[in-house]
Image: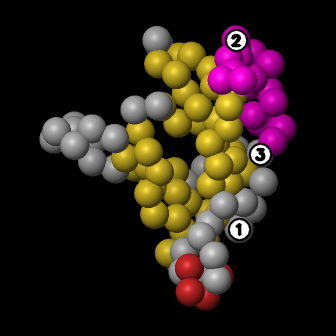
Amino acid sequence: MKYFFLSESWTTGRVWEFGGLWNEIAWKRKPYVSRQSLYIQEDGENLRLYQVEESILMIEVRPKAIAAPAIGQVVLKRLLTAEQVIDRLCREKVFTDI
C-alpha cells in the first residue's frame, strides 16, 4: 500500500497507474483509494491520511470549493510508504474520528 496526507478542503480526482490513466474497463474495478480515520493538524488545517493500492503511481487532487480557487488541481507523484507514514505520525499529534 501507499499513502498520502490531504487537506479536508481538497478531494481526489483522476488516478494513474503504470499504463497511464486508470482504466476501469481494463481493471474491471475502480482504483482503491480510501480515506482513513487518522489525521494530523498542520497550520490549523486537518490533513487526512489516505491509503491507495500499490499499483497507483499518481493521483490528482483538487480543492472542493467551486468558487475560482487559486489552484485548480495538483497531481501527487510521490506517494508515501508505510514506514514514512509511521515516522510522520510518530512526530505529530495524531487525531482520529473513531
Q: Quadrant of the N terminus?
A: bottom right
Question: Where does label 3 land, which residue?
Answer: 81
SS assignment at label 2: loop
Q: Which residues are magenta?
A: 82-98
Mark 1 vs mark 3: which is more N-terminal?
A: 1
SS assignment at label 1: loop
The amino acid marked with disc number 1 is Ser
Where residue 13 appears, as percent x and y from the top left, is 44, 57
In the image, 77 versus 13, the foreground residue is 13
Work out how far the residue at label 1 is from the one at label 2, CA to CA, in angstroms.
Answer: 30 Å
Where residue 46 appears, as percent x and y from the top left, is 52, 22
The amino acid marked with disc number 2 is Lys
Question: Where does label 1 land, which residue?
Answer: 55
Residue 60 occupies quadrant: bottom left
The amino acid marked with disc number 3 is Thr
Counting other residues with Cα less than 10 Å from the Cα at mark 3, is it few (<14), some (14-19), or many (20 or more)? some
Where residue 41 appears, as percent x and y from the top left, is 57, 16
Work out how far the residue at label 2 is from the one at label 3, CA to CA, in angstroms.
Answer: 19 Å
Mark 1 vs mark 2: which is more N-terminal?
A: 1
| Residue 90 falls within the magenta-colored stretch | yes
SS assignment at label 3: loop
Where residue 88 appears, as percent x and y from the top left, is 73, 25
| Left-right relation of 49 to 77 | right
